[in-house]
Image (tube, helix red, strand yellow):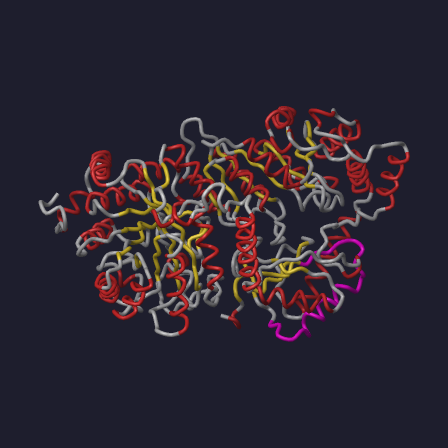
Amino acid sequence: MPANATAPTWTLPQVSHVYRLPLFELIAQAHAVHLQHHPEGEVQLCHLLSVKTGGCPEDCAYCPQAARYHTGVEATPLLSHAEVLAAAERARAAGSTRFCMGAAWRHVKDGPEFDRVLEMVRDVAGLGLEVCCTLGMLGPQQAERLAAAGLTAYNHNLDTSPEFYGHIISTRTYDDRLRTIDNVRRAGISVCCGGILGLGESETDRISLLHTLANLHPPPESVPINALVPVAGTPLTDQPEPPAAIEAFEFIRAIATARVLMPRSKVRLSAGRLALSREAQALCFYAGANSIFVGDKLLTTPNPDQDHDRALLQLLGLKAEPPTPAARRHAAPAGAGGISSPAGKLAMHAAWQSEMDADRGRSRFRTLPPLAPAAADFCSNDYLGLTRHPAVREAVERALRDGLPLGSTGSRLVSGDHPAITALEAGFAAWRGTEAALFFSSGYAAGVGVLSTLLRRQDIVFSDAHNPASLIDGMRLSGAQRVIVPHNDVAAFREALRRHPALGDQRRFLVVESLYSMDGDWAPLAELAAACASAGVAMIVDEAHATGITGAAGAGCVAARPDIEDVVVATLHPCGKALGAAGALVAGSRLLRDYLINHSRSFVFSTAPPPVLAVQISAAIRVIEQEPELASELTAQARHLREQLTALGWAPGGDPDSPIVPLVLGSDAAALAAAAALTASGFAVRAIRPPTVPEGTARLRLTVHAGQHPDAARRLASLLARAPGFRPPAYARDEAGALRPAPALR
C-alpha cells in the first residue's frame, strides 16, 4: 500500500496487482484492513426510494427508466412530501440509518420540483437519518442548496471504466460525471460513487474503474458496488449476445479490492444481490462490505426483502449499525408517548392517515366493493357456478338437517377430527390421484403453512416472478434463500439452477402456479419438471385457478401430467375458485400429510374449517366429475370473450382457453378509470394494481364463469370500445408471448 494512508495515490499497476492476488490472500488482506478502520460486525442498513420514476432522457444501456426504451417502466410524477416522509419513517423504524432518494432526471433544474426535493431533504434529515440523493448532474449552486438543506451524501456513479464508458452511455461524458462529483465535494457534501459490474466490460475495465474511484481526492465516503440486473427492453439485455452474468467470485474480488484501496469508505453491496448466494454475500461481508440496501425494491429492480436480510445478518453474527444520536432522539421512549399512551395512539393514527393519503395520491387506495349481479359479474372466480349449483346446495342443506354442526369448535389436534373433513380429504386424494390430502382453513394458510414448513433456512427456493402473495410470504417466513426466476422462462430457470448449485445439505425447490391468477397463462410444467428432474429439484405447484377446470376429471394440471408427479412433492388446491367454497387442500404423500400435521403452524394453531364446508366441497367435486361439460363450456366462453375483444382492437392477455382475461392498461389511474366506467354501466370489473401486479402493468382482470348472460361478452367489449379516453390496444404480445407496449404508444 502507498505510504500516504490519508490520501493514497494508487498507480494502475498497483491496483491491478491487488485485484489479481490469489482470492484467499486478497480476502484476508481486505478483512484485516476492514478491522483496522471499521467496527467489527456492523453493517449499515440503507433504504432507497424512487421519488420520480421513468421518463429519463439519457441512454444508459442498462437502465429501465430511460424514456427511449420499452421496459414497462412508466414515467410518474414526483412523489408527494407526505409519501416520502412516511417512507423515511418506516425505513428508520426498520433500522435503516441512511435514506436515499432517486429521481430519473438528466440534471437538476432550479424550480418547483427541486424546491420540493429540498423540502424532502430537510424533513428526512430532521428524522435523524443520513440523507442521500441521486438526481443526475449537479451545478455548483444546486449542490450548495442541497448542502444547506442538510444533505449528507450525493450519489453519482461512474458506472464503469473511462475506456469502456462510451459503449454504455452517449448522452453524457465521463468528465460530466467527474464534474458533478467535484461540485458535490466543493459544497461539503460527502460523495457516494461506485460502479456496475457485468455490463460486458473486461477485467481490465473493472481494475480501471476501481483505480479511478480510489484516486478521487479524497476517495468516495461511500462506494456502492452493483451487479447488472438485466431488464427486458434495455439494449444490454436485448442484444443478440447480452453480457454474461458477473461471476460471484469476480464480485467478491471487486469488493475486497475496493476495501483495500479505500479503507475508510463504506463499501456497499447494492443492486444485483438477488443473484448472489448467501455464501457469496457472506464472503463479501468478510472481505469488507459494510453497507447494504434493504427493502424488496431498488428504484425499479428487485432486491432481497428485509426478512431475508435480517435472517442472513443474524446467521452471520452481524448486526445493524446503530442509529445516530439524532435518530435515537426521535424514537418514542417506552412509557412516554408510546403506542399505549393517547399521544402515541394519535401519532400512530396520523401515520396511518399519511400512508393512506399517499395511497390515494398514487391511485392505490382500496375500498370494499358491493356484490354484483352474476349476469354482469366479470370479476368472480366461481368459474363453474358451483356456489349456486342445486346439487351442492342440496348436499349442504341435507347435512344441516341431519345435525351437522356449524362450527368445528377448535383445532383438529385439540377438538378432534370430524368425519366430514376426513371424508373430504380421502375423497380429494382419490380424485387428485395422491396418497393423501390435508384440509387447511384458507388458501393463504395453505401457501404460508406448506412453504414455511417444507423449506429450511439453509435451502434454496426458485420462485416464479409472478407468484401470488401466499407463496411469497411462505418463502419469506422459511428464511430460505429465494431466487426470483423470470415468469414462465424455462431457460432462465435452467440458468438459475446453474448459478445456484446445492451445497452441503442444501435442498432446492421450485415454486410455481399452474394457472397464473393475474396473467391467465399456464406454466410450462412439463419443461420445468424435466429441468427439476435432471437437477434434483423438488416442485411445489399451486393449482388455485386450475383445480376443477382442467386435468383428469378436473383435478388440475399436475393430475393431467402423471409424468411429472415424481418431482412434485406437494400441490396446493385452494377451494375458493372453481370449487365455489373456501379453505384449501394440500395433496401429496402420506408422509407429507403427517409432516404438515406435526410441523405446519398455520394448520396446528388454526381452528379447523367448519364441517359444512367439507360437505360443500365434496359435493362440488362430485358435480365436476359428473358434469364435464361445465369445463368445456367455460373454455368456449373464454375464447368467445377474447374474440370479441380482439375484434375491437384489444390485445387480451392469457392463454386462449384460460378463464382469466387480463387487459393491461399500464397506469393505476387508467385502470381505475376503466373499471369505474364499466361499473357505472352495470358491469362488475376490478382494477388490479401494484403490488398485486408489477409496476406499470395495472390492468382490468376479466373472468368468465357460468351464470354470465350469453350476450355479456359482446356488450362488455362494445362498451370498452366506446368508452372515452380508451386507446386499445394499450399492450400487445411479442414473439415470446410477453406483454409489451403497442407500437402506437411507444
Q: Is residue 169 above or below residue 344?
A: below
On the picture, is 726 further left or further right than 212? right
Where does residue 103 sit, x and y in percent of width and height? Answer: 40, 63
Hey, which quadrant is residue 94 in on the image? top left
Nearer to us in this view, 667 or 726: 667
For image coordinates 74% across by 56% down, the residue present is 636
On the picture, is 278 further left or further right than 364? left
- Total of numbered circles in the picture? 0
Q: Look at the image and say whether residue 704 sits in the magenta stretch.
A: yes
On the picture, is 106 further left or further right than 429? left
Where does residue 350 sit, x and y in percent of width and height? Answer: 54, 56
Where does residue 582 sit, x and y in percent of width and height? Answer: 73, 42
- Farthest residue in the left direction? 3
On the picture, is 180 further left or further right than 558? left
Pick the quarter of the image with the N terminus: top left
Q: Which residues are magenta?
A: 702-727
Hey, which quadrant is residue 396 in on the image? top right
Where does residue 524 sit, x and y in percent of width and height? Answer: 57, 46
Q: Is residue 250 above or below residue 379?
A: above
Q: Look at the image and say whether residue 515 sits in the magenta stretch.
A: no
Nearer to us in this view, 194 or 711: 194
For image coordinates 48% across by 34% down, the residue present is 508
